[in-house]
Image (cartoon, rainbow, N blue to C red):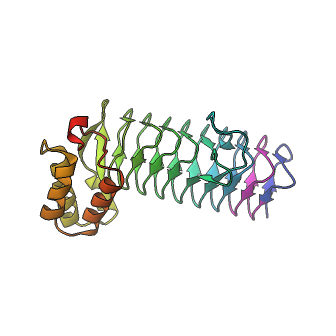
Amino acid sequence: MNKISKLAHVDPEARIGDNVVIDPFVYIEGNVVIGDNCHIRPNAVIRSGARIGNNNQIHEGSIIAATPQDFRWKGEDSLVIIGDNNTIREHVIINRSIFPGEATRIGNNSFVMAQSHIGHDSNIGDYCVLGNAVKIAGDVNIGDFTILSSNALVHERCDVGSYCLIKGGCRVNNHVPPFTIMAHNPIEYKGVNSFVLRRCNKSETAIDEIASAYRHVYASNTSVFNALRRIKVDVDDIPEKQEIIKFIEDHKLELAAVPKELEE
């Protein structure tokens, strides 16, 4: 049974699941879907195009499916799609896509802390943590199990791989390969994210091989092209190796924390 405050505005066309709590002063537009067992807290705004799964907590003052902050958007209908079991804390803004029928996406089991911003057409994976005041521009992809510490900035069209840690205040201005720790400004490679990898039951052998792969990329003073060739030969053939190779190849050897003269 739903518990919807009489002081909330819920458009009659919004589709609300079962056991949903909607607190006073919430504003929900039409063309919204909210799944079961969600709690929408005071002063949150759920705008047209929001598709929210089950068991989500949306805290005070957040705006879901805000219109895009991009001059290319001309009023097209688009979406924000949020999976299950997410916590979205106070004053988070999530913009919908700038393209008709397309979506900004958040997966499952993620935690988005206060005052963070997720731009249009970005994709946040599963089990991610976005610290306070993280800013993610448009067309960004964040892999599963990745942590962005408070005040991290991710520029548009940058991809961050899975199992990464971006330390507080870091400015990501290029692609970040999986399993890494990045810090400082300008951005620097600081090692392998072994703590999270162990928590996710990755073996010590896999962690050692990942570290070996990134020594070729970041500590050999050679081009990324040559580092990639060395990884293919020297690193044991584990799934994580293939993920690293695919990420680097898919992103045309352009990686954060590698000097431009060493990228090719």
Up-down relation of residue 208 to residue 66 (above or below):
below
Quadrant of image for the N terminus: bottom right
Up-down relation of residue 232 to residue 88 (above or below):
below
x and y, in percent, of residue 40 in the image: 70, 49
Between 119 and 245, which is closer to the camera in this rendering? 245
Assess whether residue 137 is covered by the magenta stretch.
no
Viewed as shown, does residue 85 lie left or right of 150? right
Quadrant of image for the C terminus: top left
Looking at the rendering, which quadrant does residue 64 occupy? top right
Counting every numbered tag in the picture gives: 0
Up-down relation of residue 50 to residue 199 (above or below):
above
Residue drawn at the location 84% of the way across and 43% of the way down: 7
Between 254 and 169, which is closer to the camera in this rendering? 254
Looking at the rendering, which quadrant does residue 235 occupy? bottom left
Residue drawn at the location 32% of the way across and 30% of the way down: 185
x and y, in percent, of residue 226 in the image: 16, 51
Residue drawn at the location 74% of the way across and 54% of the way down: 21
- Stretch in magenta: 16-37
x and y, in percent, of residue 166 in the image: 36, 42
Between 190 and 78, which is closer to the camera in this rendering? 78
x and y, in percent, of residue 68 in the image: 64, 39
Looking at the rendering, which quadrant does residue 3 occupy? bottom right
Viewed as shown, does residue 114 lie left or right of 72? left
Residue drawn at the location 68% of the way across and 40% of the way down: 67
Viewed as shown, does residue 126 lie left or right of 120? left
Main SS of residues in magenta: loop
Assess whether residue 30 is covered by the magenta stretch.
yes
